[in-house]
Amino acid sequence: MRKLIVCAAAIVLACGQIAAAGAEKFFDPAALTTVGVYYYPEHWDPSQWERDLKQISDMGFEFVHYAEFAWAQLEPEEGVYDFEWLDRAVELADKHGLKVIMCTSTATPPVWLVRKHPDILLTREDGVIVDHGSRQHPSVSNEFYREYSMKMITRLAEHYGSDSRIMGWQLDNEPRPFVDYGPDAQKRFREWLQRRYGSIEALNKAWGTAFWSQVYSDFSQINIPMLSQQFMNTHQILDYGRFNTEETVSFLDEQTRVIRRHITGDQWVTTNLIPDYNNGHLRQIRELDFHSYTRYMVFGENYGVGRKGYRLGPVERIAKANDFFRTIDGVYGVMELQPGQVNWGRINPQPLPGAVRLWLWHVFAGGSSFTCTYRYRQPIYGTELYHYGIVGPDGVTPTPGGLEFKTFIEEIALLRRNADPGAAAPAEFESRRTAILYNHENEWEMQRNRQTTEWNTEEHIDKYYGALKSYGAPVDFIDEGDEFSAYNVVVAPAYEMVDRELIDRWTAYVEQGGNLVLSCRTGHKTRNGQLFEAPYGYPVWDLIGADIDFYDLPMPGDPGEVEFEGRRYPWTSWGEILTPRGATEVWATYQGDFYDGRPAVTHTRRGKGTVTFIGADSHGGQLEKAVLQQLYGRLGIELLDLPAGVNIEYRDGFGIAVNYGDRTHRLPVDGKEFIIGGAEIPVAGISVWKQ
Ligand code: GAL
């Protein structure tokens, strides 16, 4: 459930503790965290269940995760439910001291349902209707799919809703908007547009249909936009993204409401979301008690630090998911954390020994309440052959990752004996706490209208995020529903679509003492993705104390340069050329093109606060990093200078460092009592000290 989240301390602004959340009540603070594993009893001979559950418990796991894809076993025929096998699996879990997360299994409707109502299947853009035999093939826009899902969930919740062995619920599996061109989706899109715009004239205006003769005279004429068709109306595509997000959200919210009718107050409801930040539903599923994420780190991409970085992944990957999900409800869990080699990458390397433990610690460091992993036994049939589990294909021998889970669980037991649950982090750490204001719709809009192949919205944001983490700053990803005044510094990178209300809120934040950092592309468009009837970025000119004269996009082979404090920073992807007004300071200038010497970065005071505008997107984010350093220096906020791959976080009275780098580093931690590791942190190492 949505709530306001604020930071723990701030230098300039008065700042309260985190608003009462609600979801904290589900987790024992003294336990710090709890670790579990997916087990699919329906995949194995029942004679092996007890052996497996006993070993799960012996390895230290505290819960199991059941029934995620088991609709066909739970309702083998329409209206005929079979919970007997699951009851037995729950009983055995309980016998071995394991709690259970129960799942709704809507990602895999049974074949009887698909054949009876074939229109529940998704229709692709090319007109092909997908078929039974995989997963995630139904459309959330189909009324039968929704109806049958809710019937099945009702029965499951009636059966397990007051069972104290069930700790909580996971909805569906990695739910996300799927594109569907079927008749139900078309109909619901038109109805959604009608509700949104009221009249066809209003829609025509919002979509700019005077352009290219696109004008509609009735909602019934509108279709879901063909996403691969060249030059398709960009405003129509933006609205389709909004609609499709809401389709997913309303399906999940409906599931939660059905479950809530039958469960006791001790059971929570969440789902396992992929941290694809450009997916709007990540924050919008309002009924959940809290949000959880899934994370895979090594699959032949995501090169981290150095030549072997692909065996660890980049340090930002878990850090950012922690900082994004924690801020939604104050509580988060990780439902799937890679246990070892996977099967679905283009290339599937082995993780570095120690990587799984490193990731577990990193998830924990961000403040998570639990970590679970997909899956206990490696599958020996089905689509995910070669995917590692906690034990290998023989069903009993722990994998290296399985043993690292065991080590982590033992280490947490050690921490539980030394913890100060809920302790505030050191004031010096909190003084650096920074918010990044993020709205996925800006990313949709800019990625579709990049203007240069050099532009990448997520990479642009990550330049700021990576710099902040390297300075040892705790970061909260916030959205417009959150309170800005809780933070000394709010960074809103490339915040393209704005309205008067947002600009007024930014202005009030700054006037009351906040420090706002804005970057190129901010304020160019209305919420419909249209340009303002004004010069580029005009709505923010007053706020930034500068005019934006034009923007440039050099050719990749001919990078521009920005000079800041005597250093030159190359850039190609976006540069806004500024004219400062009044007392606005020029911090950096463009060099060597027809706008040589013109301002690229400005800084202005307004009321009790400041606005820094960074007009260029530099290669590797080095300019952004240097500008942030100057800003924090002015504000008297002391920064760390952590080596590549190292992050430091605090929770429950502990400092925790992780090293995804390619060499041993010395941590800037003196005179502290280390509980695990020490001031020297090796590759894939972790260090934990009492704060
Ligand atoms: C996840 C998915 C799991 C499993 C896993 C394999 O994305 O949620 O069900 O398929 O990938 O790595």
Image (cartoon, grey):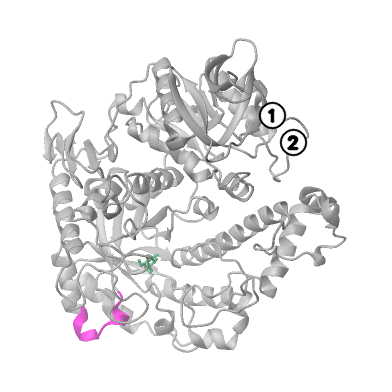
Residues at badges 1 and 2 in contact (C-beta under 8 Å)? yes
* Residue 618 image point, x, y percent: 48, 33
- Identify which residue is drawn at 71% across, 46% down: 528
What number is the disc on residue 539? 1
Residue 486 visible at all:
no
Q: Residues within 10 Å of mark 2 (few under 14, many from 20)?
A: some
Is the stretch drawn in magenta largely helix, strand or loop? helix
Classify residue 386 as left or right of residue 602.
Answer: left
Classify residue 580 as left or right of residue 364.
Answer: right
Q: Residues within 10 Å of mark 1 (few under 14, many from 20)?
A: many
Q: Is mark 1 within 8 Å of ligand 1?
A: no
Q: Is residue 146 above or below residue 47?
A: above
- Identify which residue is drawn at 39% across, 37% down: 466
* Residue 688 image point, x, y percent: 18, 39
Please report the bounds of the magenta region as a residue range: 40-49
Q: Nearer the viewer, residue 46 or 597?
A: 597
The residue singled out by tag 2 in the image is 532
Residue 473 visible at all:
yes
Q: CA distance from mark 1 to mark 2?
A: 8 Å
